[in-house]
Amino acid sequence: MKMRQMATDNPLRVLYLTSEVSPLLKVGGLGDVAGALPKALRLLGVDISIVIPWSPRVKFVLQPWEETVGEFTLVHTFLPDSEVPVILLKHPSLLETTPAAYARIAMSIVELKENGQLPFDLFHGNDWFAASTIELLSRKSIPTLLTIHNLSYHPKLLQAAIQRATMLTTVSPTYADEIRTETRHDLIGILNGIDTDVWNPLTDLLIPTQYGVENWSVGKQKNKEALVNQLNLAEPTIPLLAFIGRLDTQQKGVNKIIEILPLLLAESNVVILGTGADELERVLQKLGQQNPEHLSVNLRFDEKLAHQIYASADMMLIPSSFEPCGLVQMISMRYGTIPVAHAVGGLKDTIRDHETGSLYQEDTSSALNTAIEEALKVYQSDRWATMVMTAMQEDFSWKKSAKAYQQLYASMMSYAAGRSE
Ligand code: GLC
């Protein structure tokens, strides 16, 4: 059986390790990145394959095929609409997301490479999941690239990987500046993109009315009426503000929205979608019950509702305390939903203040409130249409960033070649 299709003659072979990959298995932003960046790299001629542990939650889009190698089963498939091979390692010891499971994966990656079943020239891993593999491969002088999406999980393991990896990237230039002293001085920030085929209001079948830059006003109003109806809210003509994301206080900051909710509900409808901390869920649920006409609280993962909200809301509230990149603001802008966001990390790098969104400096609910009030003033003026149309036309595709990764791979390979001469 032929495990990989060659993209060009003698392409660079990259193995990409992740814990999730959209649409097969998606938990958070890493899944979106892993589902899109390898596709864009493949189009540039990089022979990239993805490795993830198999889980019963994986939703196969294409019929997979299996082979047994030692005590492991390798489940093979492709990323839908691409030639990117996905190899799922199946073994009872890999069912939980633990450092021990990823240490086993590291050993099997090395074994599979050494017996020729998984040939690659360069390893690209994400977050702490890559730590053990980077450790083993660095002993064999194989080039390794680590991408940081989140510094806070398993910090000890991650720090070890940070020190050992040949090169280090994170997902936006500003976040790279913010964490350089905690990581390495040569950390590079490469901005994430979004899958612009999945996130396209012109072709999106999960929303009732498709629209583009020319008819955004009619399109969004129709979607808004449908959603306001569906969620049993009142007054489809008043502004609709949204929050989509994990409900936590450390990063995503929904607590800052809760603090100013009475002010917001006086002139707007608010819709919240996400899951997270029990206490925040309880508070939000109660507030939803107290304000059924103007607040809709949806404590679940719901892809269709997410698309509907992006297509209907006027503003997206993003009060993150820190944000390595953030995808919500990019999707929002593509759907003409203006982000009101804290000026940190990737939010600062993707939103142009007053042109495609509104950025505020201080990490407080009152700064958030001031920014929303200012945005609501623009909403009542002619400037809003210009802002929406500018936001919708920003280029958030992976093209530029995939090229940056490709160049980085190439420089790592020539550095490695130089060292072995
Ligand atoms: C993590 C970060 C988020 C980033 C995502 C993908 O979830 O918190 O900011 O967009 O990874 O890189």
Image (tube, rainbow, N blue to C red):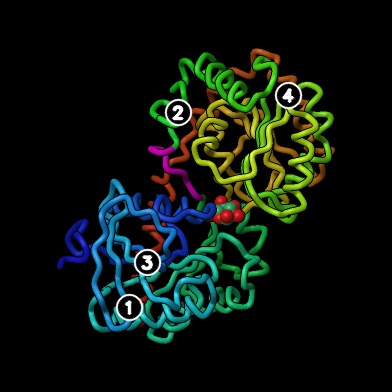
Splitting the image into 4 quarters, where does residue 374 fall? Answer: top right
Q: Label 1, label 4: how many angstroms apart (C-alpha)?
A: 54 Å
| In-image side of 151 versus 8 (left or right) | right
Residue 201 disc label: 2
Q: Label 1, label 2: how many angstroms apart (C-alpha)?
A: 42 Å
What is the x, y in percent for residue 348?
64, 44
Q: Label 3, label 1: how many angstroms apart (C-alpha)?
A: 13 Å
Query: Does the numbered disc 4 mark a residue whose Cβ is under 8 Å from ligand 1?
Result: no
- Badge 2 local density, few (<14 within 10 Å), some, or many (20+)? many
| In-image side of 3 versus 155 (left or right) | left
Instruction: Select label 3 or label 1 by which is in front.
Output: 1
- Asked if one can make out residue 217 in the rendered structure from this viewpoint, the answer is yes
> As displayed, is residue 86 above or below residue 115?
above
Q: Label 3, label 2: how many angstroms apart (C-alpha)?
A: 31 Å
Instruction: Select label 4 or label 2 by which is in front.
Output: 4
Looking at the rendered structure, the secondary structure element under dot 4 is loop
> As displayed, is residue 253 above or below residue 355?
below
- Asked if one can make out residue 348 in the rendered structure from this viewpoint, the answer is no
Q: Which residue is mark 4?
A: 293
> As displayed, is residue 119 above or below residue 245?
below
Of the pair 224 and 31, the residue shown nearer to us: 224
What is the x, y in percent for residue 249?
75, 53
Q: Which residue is mark 3?
A: 51
Residue 176 disc label: none
Q: Is residue 193 magenta?
A: yes
Quadrant placement of the C terminus: bottom left
Magenta segment boundaries in residue numbering:
192-198
Which comes sooner in the sequence, label 3 or label 4?
3
- Badge 3 local density, few (<14 within 10 Å), some, or many (20+)? many
Q: Is residue 40 magenta?
A: no
Q: Which residue is mark 1?
A: 72
Q: Label 3, label 4: how many angstroms apart (C-alpha)?
A: 46 Å
